[in-house]
């Protein structure tokens, strides 16, 4: 696991966001996935998972997006955070990914 200093922790997500705005999705994914392999907290990793999922959605890769939404949910558990953190926005996105993949309503 790579150690990440505070300056890079603040810079990398911003850089990834700029790349997404330019349409350079693959480069943004490299930065976000590098952050996921660093020593950032589970809460920060969950946010990076959401960002990766959004980028995969922009690339029209719903199965990959769904995998990162699922990973985000795994990082947000009652036991780890001490409180429920299932956010309705994320549940809605996951449901949307399922409909794109399977062309059926989520169960």
Image (cartoon, grey):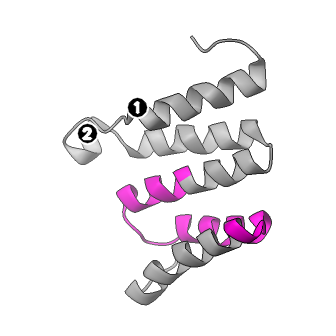
Q: Nearer the viewer, residue 24 or 81?
A: 24
Q: Quadrant of residue 39?
A: bottom left
Q: Nearer the viewer, residue 37 or 94?
A: 94
Reply yes or no: does residue 26 show up in magenta. Answer: yes
- The quarter of the rendered structure image containing the C terminus is top right
In the rendered structure, the answer to whether residue 28 lies left or right of residue 26 reads left
In the rendered structure, the answer to whether residue 12 lies left or right of residue 62 reads left
Element type at mark 1: helix
Does 103 sit above or below residue 47?
A: above
Earlier along the polypeptide chain: callout 2 or callout 1? 2
Does 15 sit above or below residue 80?
A: below
Q: Quadrant of residue 62?
A: top right
What secondary structure prevails in the magenta region? helix
Q: Residue at x 43, y 89 (%)?
A: 7
Distance between the Cα atoms at labels 2 and 1? 19 Å
In the rendered image, residue 14, in percent from the top left (x then y), is placed at 54, 76
Q: Which one is in front in this view, the residue at disc 2 or the one at disc 1?
A: 1
Q: State the residue position of label 1.
A: 88
Q: State the residue position of label 2.
A: 79
Q: Which residues are magenta?
A: 21-50
């Amino acid at each position: 696991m790579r150690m990440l200093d505070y300056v890079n922790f603040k810079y990398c997500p911003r850089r990834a966001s700029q790349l997404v705005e330019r349409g350079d999705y693959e480069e943004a994914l490299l930065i976000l996935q590098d952050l996921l392999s660093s020593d950032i907290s589970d809460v920060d990793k969950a946010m990076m998972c959401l960002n990766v999922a959004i980028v995969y959605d922009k690339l029209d890769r719903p199965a990959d997006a769904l995998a990162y939404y699922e990973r985000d949910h795994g990082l947000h558990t009652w036991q780890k955070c001490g409180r429920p953190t299932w956010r309705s926005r994320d549940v809605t996105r996951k449901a949307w990914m399922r409909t794109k993949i399977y062309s059926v309503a989520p169960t």
